[in-house]
Amino acid sequence: MDQLGIMLAVLGAALAAGLAGSGSAIGVGIAGEAGAGIMTEDPGKFGLVLLLQALPGTQGIYGLLTAFFAILKVGLLGGATVSVNVWQGLGILFACLPIAIAGYYSAIAQGKTSAACIQMIAKRPEETGKAVILPAMVETYAVLALLMSIILLNSIQL
């Protein structure tokens, strides 16, 4: 078994979970700052604020899901470790990059969009539906990146 191949796969998993999770932490924080300001004026908006604040957190979940797929593929989670050469390890690493990169940036962008929409519902609570749709549009690209990472991971033969 080539340890470098396994380590490259683990690096891909770590990047997927780490970058997407970091982007989510930043995005949720941005939205939370806006939400805290709104709730000082109207604590009754907590439910709406929470919904919009939670949206950027999904990219971290997508990164974690991709990381699980990657480490399952090489047998590091609940199975016998598979022999992985350097090229296969690189393939797994590169397969994890779409969600790592897109997850990081889209979570931050979604946090900014959510913060703007939190400001919108502060003045116009009747526009809640629109306020959820705008950050959900950013989510589309994280979902596409997750899909690509999963397709790429599934295409690597070990």
Image: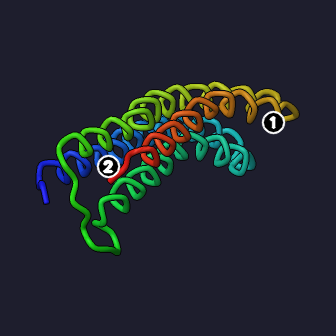
Residue tagged by mark 2? 13
Front: mark 2 or 1? 2
Query: Which of the 4 image quadrants contains residue 75?
Result: bottom left
User: Which residue is at the front of the view, 24 or 146?
Assistant: 146
Task: Tell me which label, 2 or 1, sits earlier in the chain.
Answer: 2
Residue type at mark 1 is: Thr
Q: Residue at x 50, y 47 (%)?
A: 62
| Residue 142 against residue 153 in the figure, above or below | above
Residue 88: percent from the left, percent from the top?
26, 44
Give the side of residue 99 with respect to residue 134, left or right: left
Query: Which of the 4 image quadrants contains residue 55?
Result: top right
Task: For the C terminus, give its image quadrant.
Answer: bottom left
Q: Residue at x 74, y 36 (%)?
A: 132
Residue type at mark 2 is: Ala
The Cα–Cα distance between marks 2 and 1, rounded to whole angstroms, is 36 Å
Residue tagged by mark 1? 128
Secondary structure under tag 1 reads helix
Q: Residue at x 49, y 51 (%)?
A: 61
Q: Residue at x 41, y 36 (%)?
A: 23
User: Crowdedness of circle 2 by 10 Å Cα count: few (<14), some, many (20+)?
Assistant: many
Give the side of residue 119 with respect to residue 77, left or right: right
Q: Residue furthest right?
A: 126
